[in-house]
Amino acid sequence: MTQACSIRTGYPAARALRCTGHWLAALLLGLLLLLALSGCASGAAGRSAGAGVEPVTEFDESPQRKRARIRLELALGYFEKNQVKIALDEVKQSLAADPNFVEAHVLRGLIFMHLQDDRLTQESFERALQINPRHPDALHNYGWFQCQSGRHAEAVELFNRALAVPAYAGQARTLMASGLCLTRMGQLAQAEANFARSYELDPGNPITAYNLANLLHRRAEDQRAQFIIRRLNNSELANAETLWLGIRIERRLRNTEAMAQLAQQLGRRYPQSGQWSAHQRGAFDE
């Protein structure tokens, strides 16, 4: 199971992860966590019941729910600081105050996912969905857990259920996660469609951009792939993988100058990388 390296908000978190060589995977998990936790600290005033229905405010909260929410906000703060045991204790106190608080069950699942306890992760997400079968964050994160566990078909079904929830604000990231899972299943056409829709909603997401450009390149749509990968490689989130993909795209388009510039960056910034080694061997089609 992939562990969380950071769940701090925003894409610049990738800067601290590049040194690991796996920032795409680490940033991905950070974004998935953010999706589930984005509503936890906003309070009752941040929740709405949908079009035509009066929004829920703090006045509507029961004393039990308010205590549970405050504990969950504390848990989130500790989890963001990687103080996992303290975060788990705060989640327990949140659920003691309100056993039906879905967001607390979701965070509990994410904590146990971080701790690589599959049984308690699954138990937490399933309990959240027993309480609210249409809770999009629970569906999304349970879907990602299933995808990471190799249960791809189940994962895609959960992602689709999340995407079907009206006014769901996390569609871009769920489409991205679904695209990754579909790629693992070999369903590349649907994966590309999901990445493309995710990119429309959030063109700044580097994981979506990289994977969409890669799939476009695989089926020789290199002009479109070039636009996407150039934008990514011109940002602070470029890394050895994105630069290498850019080199291969520019090579196919016979843009030797752009190819040379990217190769210079790759060799200067990542001289020990497998991508630089492949470039030196001329292994452009590996």
Image (spheres, helix red, strand yellow):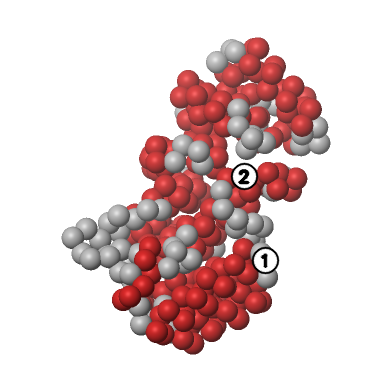
Q: The residue under label 1 is which amino acid type? A: Asn
**Horizontal arrangement in the rendering, residue 276 relative to residue 167 (left or right):** right
In the rendered structure, are the residues bearing label 1 and label 2 in contact, judged by CB atoms less than 8 Å apart?
no
Q: Which residue is mark 2?
A: 12
Q: Is residue 151 visible?
A: no
Q: Nearer the viewer, residue 57 or 50?
A: 57
Q: Earlier in the sequence, mark 1 or mark 2?
A: 2
Tag 1's secondary structure?
loop
Q: Is residue 6 above or below residue 112?
A: above
The single residue placed furthest to the right in the displayed view is 272
Q: Is residue 267 above or below residue 146?
A: above
Q: Which mark is residue 82?
A: 1
**Horizontal arrangement in the rendering, residue 81 relative to residue 94 (left or right):** right
**Residue 25 location (% of width, % of height):** 61, 50
Q: Is residue 267 above or below residue 46?
A: above
Q: The residue under label 2 is which amino acid type? A: Pro
**Residue 11 location (% of width, % of height):** 58, 45
Q: Nearer the viewer, residue 129 or 193?
A: 129
